[in-house]
Amino acid sequence: MSRGGPIGVFQPGTSVLHRIPAGWKLLGMAVAVTAALLLRQWWQLAIAAALTLVLYLLGGFGMRVLLAQLRPLRWMLLFVAVIQLLIAGWPTALRVCLVLSVTVALAALYTLTTRVSHTLDLVARALAPLRRKPLRRLAIDPDRIALVLAMTIRCVPLLAGVIDEVNQARKARGAGWSVRAIAVPAVVRTLRVADAMGEALQARGADDPDPADPRPPAAGPASGGS
């Protein structure tokens, strides 16, 4: 499974990483990211980057998939590298860029090998105590937290795709590169996607009150006139 595929979107497989439970995988990712942040030498991070590539290979992916996850960072990495070169020198610039690349690649590997539903089940189980008394009085809805997490995971590659579509349309028109030529259409498309997602959630009853919620339903808008 060496195809590029959408950024950060689950790709089915039967690899070792696909078979690891979501909880252990999330814990391992958190430990690996923390360890990468604590490394101070660029050569140590180079070893971490090599190990990250090995993990991608264990997941059934190749270098193409790994580079696809880092592609949205290319301009930010270039900007950070130039600033760090001017301020602190090439070892620091290389270290900072490697930290960003390794941490993003590890987070992307989790989403590539873990279904969103498994992550949501994990979050729901972790927040299950909030449904019990007296924690229920905190008025925290685990289902809504899980829904927000699912939408966040889905929207990251979705927004990256919107920006890529806008950029491709700009190239097709033969227009030159500018912030306005990309930002304005991207914002408009993003707002349309947000409206469509909101309507879809409302149609599926995502905003309906929970029967087990002890809070009274919110009052609707007052009608004008007597």
Image (cartoon, rainbow, N blue to C red):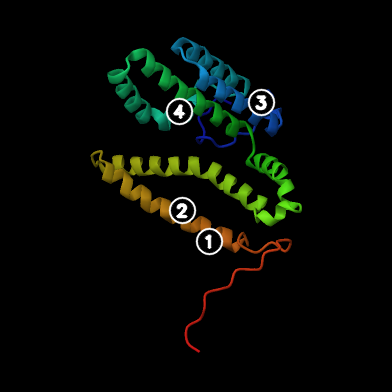
Circles 4 and 2 in contact, beta carbons < 8 Å: no
Within-10-Å neighbours for mark 2: few <14, some 14–19, many 20+: some
Within-10-Å neighbours for mark 1: few <14, some 14–19, many 20+: few
At label 2, the amino acid type is Val
User: Mark 2 sits on what residue?
Assistant: 193
Q: Quadrant of the N terminus?
A: top right
User: Mark 1 sits on what residue?
Assistant: 199
> What percent of the width, then of the height, locates residue 206?
62, 59
Question: Please, what secondary structure does the residue beneath circle 1 have?
Answer: helix
Question: Please, what secondary structure does the residue beneath circle 3 have?
Answer: helix
The span from disc 4 to disc 3 (Cα, nearest Å) is: 20 Å
Q: In which quarter of the image is residue 171?
A: top left
Q: In the image, which disc is placed on residue 17?
A: 3
User: Mark 4 sits on what residue?
Assistant: 70
- In-front residue for pair 196/221: 221
The correct choice, above or below, for 7 with respect to 53 in the image is below
User: Which mark is first along the chain, 1 or 4?
Assistant: 4
Q: Which residue is drawn at 63% across and 47% down?
A: 146
> What percent of the width, then of the height, locates residue 10?
59, 36
